Image (spheres, grey):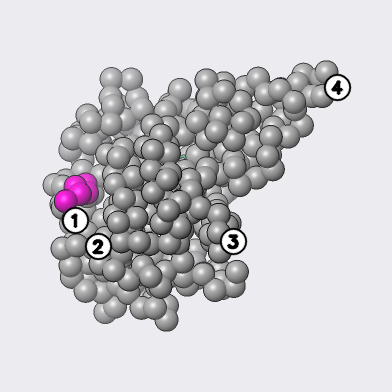
Amino acid sequence: MDDITVAVLGTGGIGRRTLELSTHKEWLTPVAACDRHGIAVDHEGLDVTELLDATEGNIASGDGGAGDPVTDGGTAIKQSGAGEGVAASVQGDSTTTPIDDVIAESGLIDAVLMALPNLEHDFIPRVADRFVGAGYDGVLIDVLKRSRVIGLLDEREEQLVDSGITFVCGAGATPGFLTGGAALAAQSFVDVESIDIRWGVGLKSGYEDNRGTVREDIAHLDGYDIETAREMTDAEIEAVIDDHDGVLEFTDMEHADDVLLERAGICDADDVSVGGVLDVRNDEKPTTTTVSVTGTTFDGERATNTFQLGDATSMAANVNGPAIGYLKTGVRMNRNGVYGVFGPAELLPGF
Ligand code: IKT
């Protein structure tokens, strides 16, 4: 497990931070990265510092966002910014088919991290189809958020298994880190009554990099949905943020923690709630990220196990750290012949 190669699809906030974090993980070698305009490939390992420097402030493919859709192999991708992106790197080449170009290299790639927009909920499943179609047999991993996407992946389970793909879904912060933590906290109980996830994110300095995430969160506000949020201009997004003085509060979010905890047998999806507070004008978290798991023990006690994240840990640390950790677990499974669709709670003690 000391030699894992990874391709990163998308160089918005999440893709960039994954590349940066990989420089702290000796066992992980980024060998390909792409955005809507370009692709960089080096099977010996990309020069991440050069790639990040060359694309700084020049993002061509965010983790979602507004703008004109572009097409890659027939798939629309929404963009948040214009620029040369990866093609501006000395390692990069321009392309109109970035994902297909990565797929063409994928025989030599252990894992593909899909840091792609979630605003079309079938986008990631359709990208998975393309890897299956090419006979890829490694790990696919995403940081998707919406519950409904998991069912779309499950529908593809047979094809993924036949191809030899280990698909780890919902592997960011929530779902991801907090889902896995909840699965661990549930082990004290024989019956889990409720799991309450409440996150806090302060995003002042990371706002530009994470406009796609903010847009996706706005889709959870009353009066908005995925379609309306996708079509909003950047100015309309700013107006919503202004209306809320920079602090957006969310309750009952459609986050896949619910179905991922249910498919791990921990509780019913209906017993899971996700909400949070996002402050785009402060780096301080507006509330401490807290997960509360309430249940009954084998010896009849009703109790709540609670865990919190440190206020100084950033969203970037709490999304990308777990994503890379789950990626490593996915590669271990893949190398042992374990294929199919797995959520974060299934990669922890069983319930
Ligand atoms: C996500 O990207 O996983 C979801 C975002 C919330 C992240 C929570 C991080 C908690 C922390 O850093 O304390 C949001 C819903 N876009």
Name the quadrant of the C terminus: top right
Residue contact between numbered discs 1 and 3, judged by CB atoms under 8 Å = no
Residue 182 appears left or right of 37: right
Give the residue at mark 3: 336
Residue 146 visible in the snapshot: no
Q: Residue at x 45, y 62 (%)?
A: 138
> How far is the residue under mark 1 from the one under mark 3?
33 Å
Give the residue at mark 1: 72
Residue 195 appears left or right of 160: right
How many labels sit on residues? 4
> How far is the residue under mark 3 from the one under mark 4?
38 Å
Which of pointers 2 and 1 lies earlier in the amino acid sequence? 1
Give the residue at mark 2: 100
Q: Is label 3 or label 4 in front?
A: 3
> How far is the residue under mark 3 from the one under mark 2?
27 Å
Quadrant position of residue 140? bottom left
Residue contact between numbered discs 2 and 1, judged by CB atoms under 8 Å = yes
Quadrant position of residue 336? bottom right
Residue 12, x across and y down, in percent = 33, 55
Establish whether ligand 1 lies closer than 8 Å to the Cβ of label 3. Answer: no
Above or below: residue 30 compared with residue 319: below
Front-lying residue, 134 or 70: 134
Residue 350 visible in the snapshot: yes
Which of pointers 3 and 4 lies earlier in the amino acid sequence? 4
